[in-house]
Image: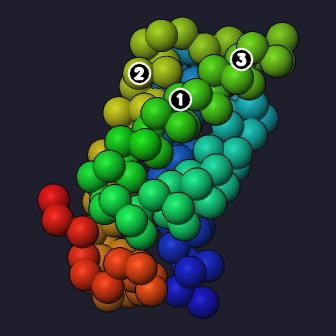
Amino acid sequence: MRTTFALILKFIATLLASWIAFDLIDENPFNWVLVIALAGSLLNYFVGYLLIMKSMGKVIESIGDGILGAFTAYVVDFLVVDFISSVTGLIVFALVIMLVEYVFHIYLYKGEIDTHNEFHKDIPLE
């Protein structure tokens, strides 16, 4: 249940970042903002949280989440005619994701969700 709650929080935070960057700045339709938020949340969870954070720590993972989110939006921009992203929108999206993810990881490290694995018993140094 805690993981579900964490994923919902992650999605809401990514939706907020996506709305700021791609609706307010780039004036895209909300359905594409929602697609970016969903894709970004899922990719950041599976790649960032499950692979990177457990071995490298929350700062590296937060930076990676921002970059992966911006890259996801850029790929959607490349593939979809109705979605347009600017450099400003991508940078704002990446920075908001980085900030939100860092705060989110502080929540995770407070013991709400176990982030350790069998290879890394100690919390990574940062």
Q: Are marks 1 and 2 in contact (CB under 8 Å)?
A: yes
Tell me: 83 left or right of 122. right
Q: Earlier in the sequence, mark 1 or mark 2?
A: 1
Q: Secondary structure at mark 2?
A: helix
Residue shown at 48% from the left, 10% from the top: 87
Instruction: Locate residue 40, reporting x and y percent.
Output: 62, 44
10 Å crowding of disc 3: few (<14), some (14-19), many (20+) = some
Outermost residue toward the left?
126
**Looking at numbered disc 2 in the image, what kind of residue is underneath it?**
Ile
Residue shown at 45% from the left, 58% from the top: 52
10 Å crowding of disc 1: few (<14), some (14-19), many (20+) = many
* Measured Cα–Cα span from mark 3 to mark 1: 10 Å
Residue 10 vertical placement versus 54 (above, below): above
Q: Which residue is mark 1?
A: 70
Q: Which residue is mark 3?
A: 77
Tell me: 118 left or right of 70. left
Quadrant in which the N terminus appears: bottom right
Residue shown at 49% from the left, 21% from the top: 90
* Measured Cα–Cα span from mark 3 to mark 2: 14 Å
Tell me: 19 left or right of 31. left
Instruction: Locate residue 105, reporting x and y percent.
Output: 34, 65
Q: Which residue is mark 2?
A: 91
**Looking at numbered disc 3 in the image, what kind of residue is underneath it?**
Asp
Q: How many marks?
A: 3
Q: Which mark is residue 6?
A: none
